Amino acid sequence: MLGAVRRQQSEGHSVQVLGVDQHARAEAGDIPSSATLVSIGLANNEVGTIQPVADVIRRAHEIGALVHVDACAGPRWIPIPSGADLVSISGHKLGAGRGGILYVKDGVRIDPLFYGGPQEWGRRAGGEDVGAATAVATALSICSQGRTERSVSASRQSAQLRALLGELGGALTGAEDRLPNFASCAFADRRGEDLLLALDLAGVAASSGSACASGSLDPSHVLLAMGLSLERALGSLRLTTGYATTDEELTRASTIIRSTLARHAARA
């Protein structure tokens, strides 16, 4: 999302990035009355905090602004609030493979992504990827079924991981109102990248930030915006459970995480 913001700035548009609280939660009341377009994520993809999207939509429409919701993170676990003018959805986050959907509310006009033919109502020239569109639509339909049961199971499993991370000295990050499968923390005495390499070699997939920033050694801008120190931000660790994660896998992963962090504590 920040890449699009920087692009708008380079083209001379006035852009304002709103701050967040210590849980990475934005506030609808911070939206200036001069705004014409508001873009917000459904949930933060680093710490899982669910954003007050319904409040943002209400505030934006009160001042006459359009609202775009980046729903790449979240639809598998929580419904997308109604009322947004634009919603973007990523297929691979739903198990549908590459591809995505941009919902455009009736009456909202946008410039074409590619110029050429009249496909996609003039919004994107070129033949439609029917297979990808069908896959994403099917995945969305499947996600809406049994969502509550999956969320309860994911919450139970992520709670175990959060308890483990806290026990091992990590400062837990993210609000109580977060995606149910998230367990993230920040260590003051360990480098996140070092932990990732060690966990990967042991067979546990983890992250030190969002997937969008994977491979970067810079501290997370999200964690810095939350008020974490540079040292803590560099020691971030993000773990998530999946819809197919079993308790046996969770137990094995917990054992590996405990032993890995113990070894790194001894080296620190």
Image: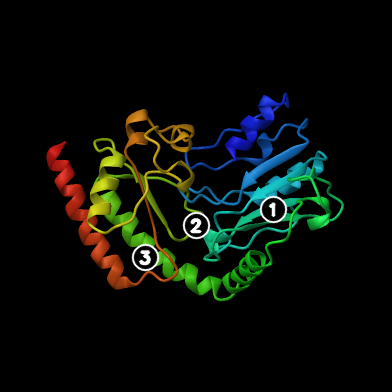
The numbered dot on residue 34 is none
Task: Say left or right for 149 vs 250.
Answer: right
* Residue at image mark 1: 87
- Foreground of the two, 171 or 43: 43
The amino acid at mark 2 is Leu
Where does residue 54 sit, x and y in percent of width and height?
A: 68, 52
Colour scheme in the image? Answer: rainbow
Gap in angstroms between the C-alphas marked 1 and 3: 29 Å
Mark toward the start of the polypeptide (3 vs 2): 3
Side of 256 where 151 appears, left or right: right
Residue at image mark 2: 179
Mark 2 touching mark 1, by CB under 8 A? no
Residue at 78%, 36% (x, y): give it: 36
If you read the primary sequence from the N terminus, does the residue marked by circle 2 or circle 1 appear first? 1
Task: Determine contact: label 1, label 3, CB under 8 Å.
Answer: no
Element at badge 1? Answer: strand
On the image, which quarter does residue 267 sit in?
Answer: top left
> Mark 1 is on which residue type?
Val
Which of the pair 152/210 is nearer the observer? 210
Q: Residues within 10 Å of mark 2 (few under 14, many from 20)?
A: many
Label 1 Cα crowd, 10 Å radius (few <14 / some 14-19 / many 20+): many
User: What residue is at 16 percent from the left and 48 percent from the top?
Assistant: 262
Q: Is residue 142 above or below residue 1?
A: below
Q: Is residue 253 above or below residue 217?
A: below
Where residue 88 appears, as percent x and y from the top left, is 66, 53
Residue that numbered label 3 is attached to:
157
